[in-house]
Image (cartoon, grey):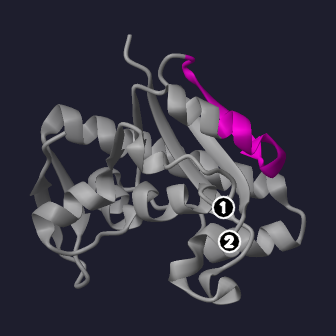
Amino acid sequence: MKNIVYFDLETQKSADEVGGWNQINKMGMSIGVTYSTARGDYKIYGEKQINELITELQRADLVVGFNNLRFDYEVLHGYTAFDLRQLPTLDMLVELQKTLQHRLSLDAITTATFGVEKTAEGLQAIRWYREGKLLEIAEYCCYDVKLTKLVYEYGAAKKQLYYNNRFGKKLSVPIHW
């Protein structure tokens, strides 16, 4: 059985706090979450378990995420010399951007495709981190991993996804994964 690992993480700091989006590796991970199809469950990682998280990603047959090449992997590059971009990876944001010629949010897809919204956003997770509310971050991150998994599986099965454009119109996009 192929081990697909769905992955998301949240950070300790914002881009503004570390000197901009070219310094993502300085943001620090607060919580990382995976869902492994081989295990059939979620795993939550704190910063102290970051090496275990990286090992799980390295052992995956495929890592699936949303903006993981440009963001999540770059955060992890602050902790490892290994170039995570070498891993077999499907970044759904990148794939959708190739087709649409613009970026989409995960929320724009999940709202139009499933009628569900994300429960929070990254800046809220940073506030929770400062308040020591790691459980809230873990719950939010698990939900994002679940949405990522749903989007991937729906796209793979139906060969299309729906999204709401910036004017609120529901459109479809062909999927090739």
Q: Amino acid at mark 2?
A: Met
Residue 26, quarter of the rendered image: bottom right
The answer to whether 14 appears left or right of 71 in the picture is right
Q: Position of residue 176 (x, y in %)?
A: 13, 43
Residue 44, quarter of the rendered image: top right
Quadrant containing the N terminus in the rendered view: top left
Say few, some or many: other residues with alpha carbon within 10 Å of mark 1 (under 14 / 14 to 19 / 20 or more).
Answer: some
Q: Separation of disc 1 and disc 2 at Cα?
A: 8 Å
Q: Position of residue 49 (x, y in %)?
A: 78, 40
Q: Residue furthest top?
A: 1
Is label 1 or label 2 in front? 1
Q: Report the residue marked by disc 2.
A: 27
> Helix, strand, or loop for circle 1?
loop
> Helix, strand, or loop for circle 2?
loop
Question: What's the residue at 21%, 75% (across, down)?
Answer: 102
Q: Amino acid at mark 1?
A: Gly
| Mark 1 / mark 2, whichever is N-terminal | 2
Question: What's the residue at 47%, 27% (across, down)?
Answer: 60
The answer to whether 145 appears left or right of 149 in the picture is right
Above/below status of 4 relative to 23: above
Q: Position of residue 105 (x, y in %)?
A: 37, 68
Q: Position of residue 39 (x, y in %)?
A: 57, 17
Say few, some or many: other residues with alpha carbon within 10 Å of mark 2 (under 14 / 14 to 19 / 20 or more).
Answer: many
Question: What's the residue at 54%, 19% (across, down)?
Answer: 40
Nearest to the observer: residue 153 or residue 59: 59
- Say if mark 1 contacts mark 2, CB within 8 Å: yes
Q: Report the residue marked by disc 1.
A: 78
Q: Which residues are magenta?
A: 39-53
